[in-house]
Image (spheres, rainbow, N blue to C red):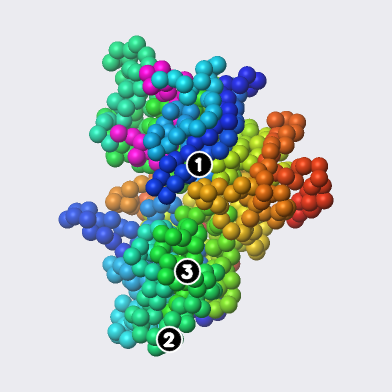
Amino acid sequence: MGTEKLLDVKNLTISFHTYVGEVAAVRNVDFHLKEGEVLAIVGESGCGKTVSTKAILGLTPIPPGEIKTGKILFKNRDLLKLDEKELSKICGDQISMIFQDPMSYLNPTMTVGNQIREVLHQHNDMNRRESKDRAIDLMMSVGIPEPKLRIKQYPHELSGGMKQRIMIAIAMANRPDILIADEPTTSLDVTIQEQIFYLLKELKIKYRTALILITHNFGVVAGIADRVVIMYAGKVMEEGEVEHIYYNPYHPYTASLLNAVPSIADDYERKLRTIKGSPPFLLNVPPGCPFAERCDYLMEVCIKKEPPYFRFKDNRRVACWLYHNLADSQLQRFKEREVKK
Amino acid sequence: MQEKILELKNLSKFFYLSRNRVLKAVSNINFEIYRGETFAIVGESGCGKSTLGRTIKGIYLPTMGQEIYEGKDIYKMNKMDKKNYLRDIQIIFQDPYSSLNPRMMVEEIVREGLDIHKIGTKEIRKKKVLDTLNLVGITSEYLTRYPHEFSGGQRQRLAIARALATEPKFIICDEPISALDVSIQGQIVNLLKELQDKFGLTYIFITHDLSMVKYISDRVGVMYLGKLVEIAGKKELFENPKHPYTRALLSSIPIPDPRKERKRKKMPIKGEIPSPLEDIEGCSFKTRCPDVTPICDRMEDKLIDVGNNHFVMCTKYA
């Protein structure tokens, strides 16, 4: 794994203008990705994880969206400043993305073979025979049986798992430096999920691709991620290496989320722990910490002022007032909480 | 064990798509459910678990078989008994965004069952609606709101209130939590458990999430391509799974713990679930099974008793 920052998202703020008002979907988000690394962005629905990564590829719909502040640095260029033509040279070539629902992202009127070849022709000088051979190779490498036959089929003729494999073949066609996978297995069954992640791990090693995995599934993250970013209500709440996050979460949100996740490895008869309340609406963002009203370690300052990032070694950071030196006693309470075995 | 509340005998539901195409969504299901228990039905998408749930509720008429509720076959009941049955058995659906009528107020949604079954006077009904909403944690100020004003978790609470209003004995929960976030899932599961303890409800809990099954069920049935391939007590099933499919299913669930997850023995089963339109002779899992033998082609649809209230449909145990 390299130490160079391959991708650096800085201070990204994205809002959506709706009839009811401005929705602050992503607020001052920072994260970076190193060469060959797997970064997981984890959060519940509506936390801004998809919005912030779609912006990398220029997929934010503007309007109603508006990128208010921020930089997305890739190989020393700010992707937000590039025009459409320049960006389209990078997308699908050096950075590519796969989505949750392969049915709605594949073109229903084109054969899957042509969809793979399209991205090959777009970025390479290739003749038709070469691209066909390459497409068949790619389909083989993503585990599609009988690729010579399948290449002529349309998306509706394939199962969900096969469609996701086609999406992966398209995304990996030009051996990108970065693959962004947005909930790649949420619409698939567990046995197929297992196959897809097996494939992604294989491809990642083969092509040395760095991966940004967006998900809400803590099980999947545990198996593949090197580093984890926890998002909530449009903000990064905590960031750290995967083992740190799972075994010693710093943010009360991360801790309660991990506690609420059911696990097949758990004891029987344990009552499921929950988080009270529900996430805030991002229409009127509360001035303090967005998790304040659901937090068991609430302090006065949490409601009034947004917490800054407190930074620790190994690139760990957490947005929580508990780490302010005036909050020692409350932090002690958090550290002594009941942890699920 | 306790008293049987429901028994299914050779229940099948086929959909006739065109002259030669039959979709065997549910075939030859046999099991019984005891009063007060939670029976989980687990399976991947397209395995027929929702069709089974709907057939039990009577939304679909079965192609074959019997469903015996408190000693009477529900498909042969007289009108009065049938009406009582429909009151006693309620259903909660997966997607609280499409299962609540967007044009009805909360009060109307919850009261509808009471109106249909003509329970009580107007005042009694109104009180009943309020009491039920209180049970699920929704206060009276929301009575005149519409579903779109609620979040996913709250809508699912409304769906539960609607199911509870007629004081059912039995609730079919068809993936009631899969559309919700983790932090909300727990709230709904705990609520369902509380209600069960309070009213002695019996649940059929249909899900694809085996890790959740561990928290809520007493017994588990595993479905594959329309057939129930294994039934066992929860502990027995998790500790001693017999069917190769159940084993594959259990082994492919990621564990939210990096060290355990990276050590987990991964044995991804090859291939995908075949189309339910295909007529597969013998065992329907044979196309993906790691231990397939020639006799699998001739397997009968019969659950084999392997002791300890554990039943499995696999030639290995014949």
* Same chain? Circles 3 and 2: yes
Q: Chain of mark 2?
A: B
Q: Chain of mark 1?
A: A
Q: State the residue in front, B14 or B195.
A: B195
Determine whether B254 is above or below A297 in the image. above
The local crowd at label 3, few if under 14, some if 14 to 19, many if 20 or more residues have their Cα within 10 Å, is some
The spot of residue A333 in percent (x, y) is: 79, 53
Secondary element under disc 2, as helix, strand or loop, is helix
Determine whether B279 is above or below B230 in the image. above
* Same chain? Circles 1 and 3: no
Residue located at (45% from left, 27% from top): A57
Residue B135, visible in the rendered structure: yes
Q: State the residue in front, A62 or A330.
A: A62
**Residue holding disc 1:** A25
Residue located at (63% from left, 19% from top): A4
Q: State the residue in front, B233 or A111.
A: A111
**Residue holding disc 3:** B142
Residue located at (36% from left, 46% from top): B274
Determine whether A6 is above or below B89 in the image. above
The spot of residue B236 in percent (x, y) is: 60, 61
**Residue holding disc 2:** B123
Residue type (three-letter) at the residue carrying disc 2 = Glu
The local crowd at label 2, few if under 14, some if 14 to 19, many if 20 or more residues have their Cα within 10 Å, is few
Residue located at (54% from left, 22% from top): A73
Residue B196 numbered mark, or none:
none
Residue B221, visible in the rendered structure: no
Residue type (three-letter) at the residue carrying disc 1 = Ala
Measured Cα–Cα span from mark 1 to mark 3 = 27 Å
The quadrant in which residue A122 appears is top left
The quadrant in which residue B282 appears is bottom left
Q: Which residues make up the magenta segment?
A: A84-107
* Same chain? Circles 2 and 1: no
